[in-house]
Image (spheres, rainbow, N blue to C red):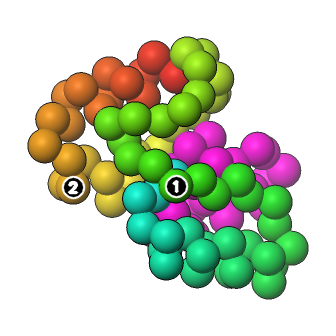
Amino acid sequence: MISAAEAVFLTEEIAKFGLNATGLDPSVPSLNSARNHARILNLSINYQEGTGEKINYPDKHFDIVFCLDVLEHVKYYMAVLSFFQARI
């Protein structure tokens, strides 16, 4: 699963089910806040710095991609959706 760090509550809920969760966000302060919150809750979430236009994961790496608080921040949202779709 991959989602923006700003979607921290969804990412945490997914991690509570024991699923591997990855959060992606371009904002280092947002990432640090999300990491700290996950640590307090004893959740293992892989938060990475990045953008929807470019993520460093191979095709078919994820089972699910949640795209929350993302598309309104990118210029070419269809390209981002296609990029994410290739990772599933």
Q: Residue shown at 76%/44% (left/top)?
A: 20
Instruction: Name the amino acid type tagged 2.
Output: His
* Range of residues picked out in magenta: 1-23
Q: Horizontal placement of 31 versus 15: left or right?
A: left
In the figure, residue 39 lies in which quadrant?
Answer: bottom right
Q: Measured along the vertical axis of the image, is residue 77 above or below residue 87?
A: below
Distance, label 2 to label 1, CA atoms, is 15 Å
Quadrant housing the C terminus = top right
Q: Nearer the viewer, residue 64 or 73?
A: 73
Find out whether residue 19 is within the magenta segment.
yes
Quick check: 18 left or right of 45? Answer: right
Residue 49, x across and y down, in percent: 52, 55
Q: Residue at x 59, y 53 (%)?
A: 48
Position of 17 relative to 81 (above/below): below
State the residue in front, 50 or 38: 50
Percent x, y of residue 12? 67, 64
Whichever of callouts 2 and 1 sits on the residue coming sooner in the sequence is 1
Quarter of the picture containing the N terminus is: top right
Q: Secondary structure at mark 1?
A: strand
Mark number, residue 49: 1
In the image, which disc is placed on residue 12?
none
Callout 2 secondary element: helix
Residue occupied by mark 2: 73
Q: Position of residue 70 (x, y in %)?
A: 31, 52
Q: Is residue 14 among what the camera can see?
A: no
